[in-house]
Amino acid sequence: MNATAKTDPWIRCAKPNPAARLRLFCLPYAGGGASLFRDWGQALPDSVEVCAIQLPGREDRIAETPFRQVEDLLPVLLEKLRPYLDRPIAFFGHSMGAFLSYELARALTEEHRGPAHLIVSGQRAPHLPLSRPPSYHLSDSAFCDRLRSLNGTPASVLQEPELLTMILPLLRSDFEMSETYLRTSRSQLECPISVLGGEEDDEVDPAGLEAWREATVGPVSVRMFPGDHFFLQSQKDALLTLTEQTLRPHLH
């Protein structure tokens, strides 16, 4: 049975493929949704089925309460993924999505169902402390200043009170999840890790990317792209090309 043929609020597959050799689960940054990966299935080979994770509180799940703690979200996500583990899998995650992908990979590895590959983007290694003080609890004005510094929220949104009223609760919840995530050494993965970073990203330093080498016993590669923390968007074509090259050895 092809699980992706079902309607699933958590797992979005824009191009279902029952014959795919590998499923790529994609997890977004704070405030982001599954639509970020809507056309990835068209860009990657037919042998890859792209499954984007849609977390509560965003896009068509905006009426649902977002999670605020990794410890609460992780067991729910694991259960949602289990029907989709009937073939090899890989993870791609950017920023918040990177450490969520790592935690899912780690939990599945402990069950001897680990991924073939983990691609992490725009995130320091999970055992390193935060590079900045937490911001999720700041005043609206100060929190918006923090969002501006990341350059990921359009200025037009930050200047529109009605839009801010809608999105700030979600962003605060995602930032709380990211900033209270227990960053400590854990059991190592067994799969290869591809680490991606932006050359002008003030949030993630090269040393923080290199430190992912401690997260697995498998090989680790680090690749830098032009752009800031959201090079995921500005370098999309190059990123998809690299993703295809990264996954190609797992498609045979």
Image (tube, rainbow, N blue to C red):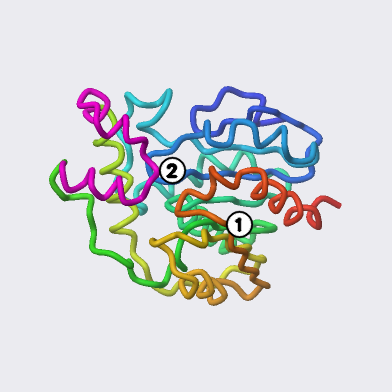
* Rendering coords of residue 87 (x, y %): 73, 46
Task: Say what secondary structure mark 2 lies in.
Answer: helix
Q: Earlier in the sequence, mark 2 or mark 1?
A: 2
> Tag on residue 119?
1
Residue position marked by numbered label 2 in the rendering = 76
At 70% from the left and 29% from the top, the residue drawn is 16
Tell me, yes or no, whether the highlighted magenta stretch contains residue 161. yes
Q: Main secondary structure of the magenta part?
A: helix
Find the distance from the CA under tag 2 to the CA under tag 1: 22 Å
- Report the quarter where the N terminus lies: top right
In the rendered view, does 89 fall on the left or right side of 178?
Answer: right
Q: Nearer the viewer, residue 38 or 83?
A: 38
At 38% from the left and 39% from the top, the residue drawn is 31
In the rendered view, does 7 fall on the left or right side of 243?
Answer: left
Q: What's drawn in magenta, residue-wise? A: 141-165
In the rendered view, does 230 fall on the left or right side of 223?
Answer: left
In the rendered view, does 248 fall on the left or right side of 10?
Answer: right
At 70% from the left and 53% from the top, the residue drawn is 242
Q: Nearer the viewer, residue 179 or 162?
A: 162
The type of residue carrying mark 2 is: Val
* Rendering coords of residue 232 (x, y %): 54, 47
The type of residue carrying mark 1 is: Ile
* Rendering coords of residue 58 (x, y %): 39, 31
Occupied quadrant, residue 114: bottom right
Task: Say what secondary structure mark 1 lies in.
Answer: strand
Local packing at callout 1 (Cα closer than 10 Å; few below 14, some 14-19, many 20+) is: many
| Total numbered circles | 2
